[in-house]
Image (tube, helix red, strand yellow):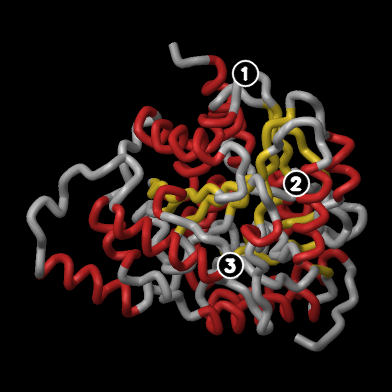
């Protein structure tokens, strides 16, 4: 018999995956062009040219041992290239030893948490947040402590401070945020660092950064390394290079971190004993050659604007995201997010309830879908608004 822990998780499942499977069912019934599936953040743009060129070059010119084992932390040349890039961005002197190549950000987060947590240690997460954080924390016998952000989805430093206990080991931040798309500014990061440094024990900040290259309206993401001392970065190329299926990322420990020596060694050990052993060899070499490349961000910005206009014009409310791949749409008054998503599903409009991100009253829509899907969804938004008696702000 399987464990009761896993049995309970199977019963709960993932709302994102459930919506994704429902989308596949509806597409089979009504045709893909008549289903508007915004449930899953699966980048639909192809990787940039630099990625395919690097992959082709490596395949055509293999070096001896290219597919063999390397250090559990990854290739020295790849880690040195990443360290140099992060040094230039932050102004800090970062060396290759700070970096551990991982099997995507999920593996990186598990490596970090395994390295930090003893049984019942606490990790603060800021709602709304990517729901798998709680599972990753539980994997290593930790406890998730949820702290709400403000109405603007920005961290509430006072609320975070009140949630800290002697068992608090870390806080996870995610900017640009999934699902809200907000970017944490310099003042927020500095205030968080000041508050944490005034605590009576070290509290690590885990910065989950898969979306830092996906920002819009000419904005930039402040380098957390500049503003937070006890920082551990977790990064993935799943979004910036459209490589979610290749599972390639890294962790990076700030040279200012009080536990630098222990942490860098612990994360490499965790990478091995949790079963990853090392990140995929060929993809380490590919990303090393593609560090300055990124997907067509302007394309995502264009689609963000299209979807946002659909939502607002039909009479609904949402904050326009500054980054990432999602719009967090407010649920109409008088409806739960589950009720609203069910009404939308009748129009083949698939959204993920905000309760999945520990922020009821909202629904998440991923705009990394085709322009055809976004344009086709306009009539569905208006149909839902009409059913709910909302007044459209603009003609369909």
In percent of width and height, residue 120 lies at: 67, 20
Quarter containing the C terminus = bottom right
Quarter containing the N terminus = top left
Q: CA distance from mark 2 to mark 3?
A: 28 Å
Instruction: Determine the residue positioned at 66% across, 61% down.
Output: 226
On residue 119, the disc is: 1
Q: CA distance from mark 1 to mark 3?
A: 36 Å
Helix, strand, or loop for circle 2?
strand
Q: Which residue is mark 2?
A: 126
Q: Nearer the viewer, mark 2 or mark 3?
A: 3
Q: Which residue is mark 3?
A: 91
On residue 278, the disc is: none
User: Dot 1: few (<14), some (14–19), or many (≥20) neighbours within 10 Å?
Assistant: few
In percent of width and height, residue 235 lies at: 50, 55
> Measured along the vertical axis of the image, is residue 66 above or below residue 158?
below
Contact between marks 1 and 2 (CB within 8 A): the answer is: no
In percent of width and height, residue 89 lies at: 56, 70
Question: Mark 2 or mark 3, which has the lower sequence index?
Answer: 3
Contact between marks 1 and 3 (CB within 8 A): the answer is: no
User: Would you say residue 366 is visible in this rendering?
Assistant: yes
Q: CA distance from mark 1 to mark 2?
A: 21 Å
In percent of width and height, residue 183 lies at: 71, 65
Instruction: Determine the residue positioned at 10% across, 62% down.
Output: 62
Helix, strand, or loop for circle 1?
loop
The outermost residue toward the bottom is: 395
> Measured along the vertical axis of the image, is residue 147 above or below residue 301?
above
Question: Mark 1 or mark 3, which has the lower sequence index?
Answer: 3
Instruction: Determine the residue positioned at 61% across, 49% down.
Output: 256
Contact between marks 2 and 3 (CB within 8 A): the answer is: no
User: Would you say residue 31 is visible in this rendering?
Assistant: no
The image shows a total of numbered marks equal to: 3
């Amino acid at each position: 018999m399987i464990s009761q822990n896993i049995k309970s998780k199977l019963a709960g499942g993932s709302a994102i995956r459930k919506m994704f499977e429902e989308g596949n069912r509806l597409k089979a019934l009504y045709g893909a062009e008549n289903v508007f599936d915004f449930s899953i953040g699966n980048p639909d743009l192809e990787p940039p040219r630099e990625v395919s060129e690097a992959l082709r070059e490596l395949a055509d010119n293999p070096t001896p041992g290219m597919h063999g084992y390397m250090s559990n932390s990854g290739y020295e040349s790849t880690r040195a290239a990443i360290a140099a890039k992060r040094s230039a961005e932050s102004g800090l002197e970062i060396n290759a030893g700070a970096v551990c190549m991982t099997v995507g950000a999920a593996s990186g987060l598990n490596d970090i948490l395994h390295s930090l947590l003893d049984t019942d240690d606490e990790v603060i997460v800021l709602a709304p947040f990517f729901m798998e954080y709680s599972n990753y924390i539980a994997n290593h016998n930790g406890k998730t402590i949820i702290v709400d952000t403000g109405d603007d989805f920005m961290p509430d430093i006072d609320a975070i401070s009140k949630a800290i206990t002697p068992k608090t080991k870390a806080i996870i931040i995610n900017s640009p945020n999934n699902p809200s798309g907000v970017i944490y500014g310099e003042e927020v990061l500095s205030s968080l660092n000041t508050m944490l440094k005034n605590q009576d024990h070290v509290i690590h900040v885990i910065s989950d950064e898969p979306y830092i290259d996906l920002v819009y309206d000419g904005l930039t993401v402040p380098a957390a390394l500049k503003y937070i001392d006890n920082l551990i970065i977790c990064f993935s190329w799943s979004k910036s290079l459209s490589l979610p299926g290749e599972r390639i990322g890294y962790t990076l420990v700030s040279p200012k971190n009080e536990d630098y020596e222990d942490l860098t060694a612990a994360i490499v050990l965790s990478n091995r004993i949790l079963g990853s052993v090392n990140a995929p060899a060929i993809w380490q070499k590919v990303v090393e050659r593609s560090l300055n490349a990124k997907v067509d961000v302007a394309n995502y910005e264009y689609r963000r604007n299209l979807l946002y206009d659909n939502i607002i014009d039909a009479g609904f409310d949402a904050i326009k995201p500054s980054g990432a791949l999602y719009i967090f749409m407010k649920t109409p008054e008088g409806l739960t997010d589950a009720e609203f998503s069910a009404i939308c599903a009748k129009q083949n409009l698939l959204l993920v309830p905000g309760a999945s991100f520990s922020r009821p009253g909202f629904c998440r829509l991923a705009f990394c879908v085709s322009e055809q899907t976004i344009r086709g969804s306009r009539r569905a938004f208006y149909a839902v608004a009409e059913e709910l008696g909302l007044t459209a702000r603009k003609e369909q």
